[in-house]
Amino acid sequence: MPASGVSAAALAARLSALGLLTRVEEHPRHTSVEAEVPESLSAETWRELLEVVAEADRFGLLATSLNGRTLWAAVHKAVPTTGDVGGPSHQR
């Protein structure tokens, strides 16, 4: 599992520990975590949720009258590097 997947799984576990049902999805450039947020949530729980998602590279809240509220977080995947980044003429 890529490092982004491990980080996202840790975020999901922490959100689950706060009582949220989470889902983790792999994407080409990031791993995402989503959780449905219930209407009745204490201010303390909101603070804890924000502390968790603040560790992600990006996060947000999608709220609609049809689908409720979904908290999301994204962890970027590392860009692969090669040993010959500078090309054949690159001197170290």
Image (tube, helix red, strand yellow):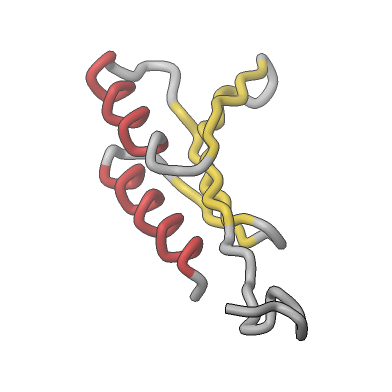
Q: Residue at x 27, y 29 (%)?
A: 48
Please tell me which residue lies in front, 55 or 92.
Answer: 92
Q: Please give the count of numbered marks on the rendered protein.
A: 0
Please tell me which residue lies in front, 20 or 5.
Answer: 5
Q: Residue at x 68, y 82 (%)?
A: 84
Residue 4, x across and y down, in percent: 50, 61
Image quarter (top left, top right, bottom left or bottom right) of the C terminus: bottom right
Residue 56, x across and y down, in percent: 45, 43
Please tell me which residue lies in front, 70 or 49.
Answer: 49
Q: Residue at x 44, y 17 (%)?
A: 39
**Quadrant of the image occupied by residue 80:** bottom right
Q: Relative to 54, is 13 above or below?
A: below
Q: Relative to 29, is 18 above or below?
A: above
Q: Residue at x 34, y 46 (%)?
A: 16
Left or right: 28 as drawn, with respect to 24? right
As drawn, which residue projects farthest toward the front?
91
Residue 72, x across and y down, in percent: 54, 37
**Quadrant of the image occupied by residue 70:** top right
Left or right: 28 as drawn, with respect to 45? right
Q: Relative to 34, is 92 above or below?
A: below
As drawn, which residue projects farthest toward the right?
88
Please tell me which residue lies in front, 80 or 73.
Answer: 80
Residue 23, x across and y down, in percent: 52, 52
